[in-house]
């Protein structure tokens, strides 16, 4: 190799070793002993919202998620739906403070208000336009032994839950008004398992395991694509009583309750977006309410001896 070639190669190597000349930054020494903790972004505490589990958790989720999203966006609150397994667990969680906002029947609200001071602040207008609802007393159509309410004497009755309004209390009241008391039935059973209790009552009657059942109005339609509803006879609708509504747990901040209430009352069925939310939740609209709204239910509880 000639001296000129050697000088040329040395120049090339020098250029490659020069910092910054090849577009790469100079190496930086990293001291791993120096660390900085990065705190996660804090989320506001969750406001828990629960739907009394008369239907399956899937139905509860599908019906109320659009409403919960709307409430969260309108109030800026972190509202999360929780899923109690039973009516009793729902009431316990409300009393213990693990449910902040409860959507339930007036029977449950009346009991929890008496026990712990929960605050009833809103109620729904049913899709029918009424601020009340009732129950249905059902039997299987081809049961020759049951043609009337009187025929239910001595028979097996399945109800939704001991704390169900349309699925037990209203039916019991109607039986009592027609001369049948609890002791006049061979058996009074309550639907087993978590959620899906209305469906369980209907299926219990449909299968013939029970002679008579009580559900809230509108429940039969849930099984329209699963069973032949023509095989179910409605023996009687019950009288109507104050409808479902909302209560806040004791101690929930007034400003939280007012924010949620204001957002609920702002839902306008004339607004197409709001109409979709209300329809999904099976509501006509939401209006303000107070404890006086479930007084007729308390009167019924007293009348039937519960």
Image (spheres, rainbow, N blue to C red):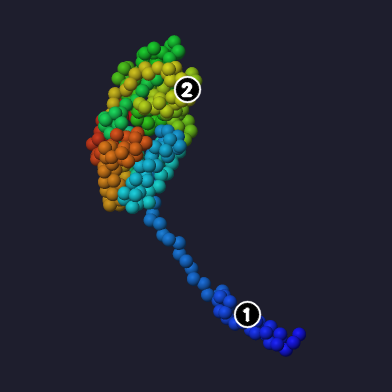
Give the residue displayed 30% in from the left and 20% down from the top: 177
Q: Which mark is residue 227?
A: 2
Location of residue 215 by image quarter: top left
**The residue positioned farthest toward the top in the image shown:** 144
Q: Which residue is mark 1?
A: 16
Q: Is residue 102 above or below residue 135?
A: below
Q: Could you tell me which secondary element the residue under label 2 belongs to?
A: loop
Q: Is residue 122 visible?
A: no
Q: Going from the N terminus, do you reach mark 2 or mark 1 first? A: 1
Give the residue displayed 35% in from the left and 26% down from the top: 217
**The residue positioned farthest toward the bottom in the image shown:** 3
Location of residue 143 by image quarter: top left
Residue 151: % across, % down: 39, 13
Residue 237: % across, % down: 33, 21
Give the residue displayed 28% in from the left and 52% down from the top: 255
Work out how far the residue at label 2 is from the one at label 1, CA to CA, in angstroms: 81 Å
């Amino acid at each position: 190799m000639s001296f000129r070639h050697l000088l040329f190669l040395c120049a090339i190597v020098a250029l490659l070793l020069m910092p910054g000349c090849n577009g790469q930054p100079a190496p930086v020494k990293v001291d791993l002993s120096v660390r900085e903790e990065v705190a996660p972004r804090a989320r506001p505490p969750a406001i828990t919202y629960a739907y009394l589990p008369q239907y399956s958790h899937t139905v509860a989720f599908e019906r109320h998620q659009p409403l919960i999203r709307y409430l969260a966006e309108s109030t800026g609150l972190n509202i999360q739906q929780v899923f109690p397994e039973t009516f009793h667990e729902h009431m316990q969680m409300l009393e213990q403070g693990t449910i902040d906002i409860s959507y339930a029947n007036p029977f449950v609200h009346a009991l929890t208000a008496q026990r712990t001071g929960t605050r009833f602040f809103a109620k729904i207008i049913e899709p029918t336009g009424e601020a009340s609802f009732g129950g249905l007393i059902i039997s299987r159509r081809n049961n020759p032994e049951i043609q009337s309410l009187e025929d239910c004497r001595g028979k097996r009755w399945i109800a939704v839950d001991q704390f169900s309004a349309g699925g037990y209390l209203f039916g019991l009241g109607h039986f009592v008004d027609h001369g049948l008391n609890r002791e006049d039935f061979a058996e009074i059973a309550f639907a087993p398992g978590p959620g899906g209790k209305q469906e369980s009552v209907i299926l219990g009657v449909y299968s013939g395991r029970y002679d008579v059942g009580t559900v809230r109005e509108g429940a039969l339609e849930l099984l329209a694509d699963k069973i032949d509803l023509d095989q179910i006879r409605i023996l009687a609708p019950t009288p109507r009583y104050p409808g479902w509504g909302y209560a806040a747990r004791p101690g929930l901040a007034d400003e939280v309750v007012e924010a949620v209430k204001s957002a609920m009352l702002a839902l306008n069925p004339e607004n197409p977006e709001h109409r979709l939310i209300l329809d999904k939740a099976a509501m006509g609209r939401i209006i303000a309410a107070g404890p006086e709204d479930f007084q007729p239910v308390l009167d019924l509880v007293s009348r039937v001896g519960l």
